[in-house]
């Protein structure tokens, strides 16, 4: 079956629903937290992303069936004084992993970053997600290092409580 990747149009209800189902599929996976999307996220996420001008997403299709997605957000590199594109989520349906879908999605993101004039693509990955790490390395990703003596960058977070 033919694999194709197309930019996501959240205005198309069927595509938005398929995208949300794939994202929920990933959220249920142990590497996605194992809990699925919250009812709040399911209800509000599509509309919230429609309002974010820096959102860039795509769906991968085998034939007419959506089988993967990539969600990216525009950022900025102060050191390069140029935009960057961060891959926030990449999802391949669990039954279809290892068939090149992830590589096709990463290639789409690289093309989008190039079209936007970005200096780099960034992403985060769980340290024990060895399958994803191998895929990212095949696509040319490497740990972020400014000076080897300083070590590689780590992603940290601090949750903000709602008021």
Image (cartoon, helix red, strand yellow):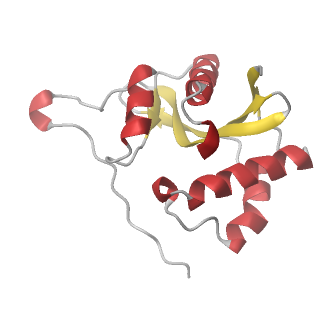
The residue sitting at 74% across, 65% down in the picture is 42
Q: Nearer the viewer, residue 106 or 116?
A: 106
Residue at the far bottom in the pictured view: 163
The residue sitting at 64% across, 17% down in the picture is 115
In the picture, residue 54 is in which quadrant? top right
- Provide residue 88's location: percent of width, then percent of height: 54, 44
Q: Is residue 75 visible?
A: yes
In the picture, residue 11 is in which quadrant? top right
The correct choice, above or below, for 39 with respect to 147 in the image is below
- Provide residue 144's location: percent of width, then percent of height: 30, 32
The residue sitting at 47% across, 58% down in the picture is 30
- Provide residue 61's location: percent of width, then percent of height: 76, 31
Q: Is residue 49 visible?
A: no
The correct choice, above or below, for 53 with respect to 117 in the image is below
Quadrant housing the N terminus: top right
Q: Nearer the viewer, residue 142 or 35?
A: 35
In the picture, residue 66 is in which quadrant? top right
- Provide residue 40's location: percent of width, then percent of height: 70, 72
Describe residue 31's horizontal placement relative to residue 163 as left or right: left
């Amino acid at each position: 079956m033919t694999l194709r990747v197309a930019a996501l149009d959240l205005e198309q209800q069927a595509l938005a629903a398929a995208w949300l189902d794939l994202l929920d599929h990933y959220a249920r996976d142990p590497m996605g937290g194992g809990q699925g999307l919250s009812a709040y996220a399911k209800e509000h996420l599509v509309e919230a992303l429609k309002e974010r001008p820096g959102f860039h997403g795509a769906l991968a299709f085998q034939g007419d069936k959506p089988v993967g997605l990539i969600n990216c957000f525009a950022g900025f590199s102060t050191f390069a004084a140029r935009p960057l594109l961060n891959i926030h989520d990449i999802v391949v349906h669990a039954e279809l992993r290892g068939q090149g879908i992830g590589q096709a999605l990463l290639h789409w993101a690289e093309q989008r970053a190039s079209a936007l004039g970005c200096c780099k693509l960034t992403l985060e990955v769980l340290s024990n997600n060895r399958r994803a790490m191998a895929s990212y390395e095949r696509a040319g990703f490497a740990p972020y290092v400014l000076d080897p003596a300083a070590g590689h960058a780590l992603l940290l977070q601090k949750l903000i409580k709602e008021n």
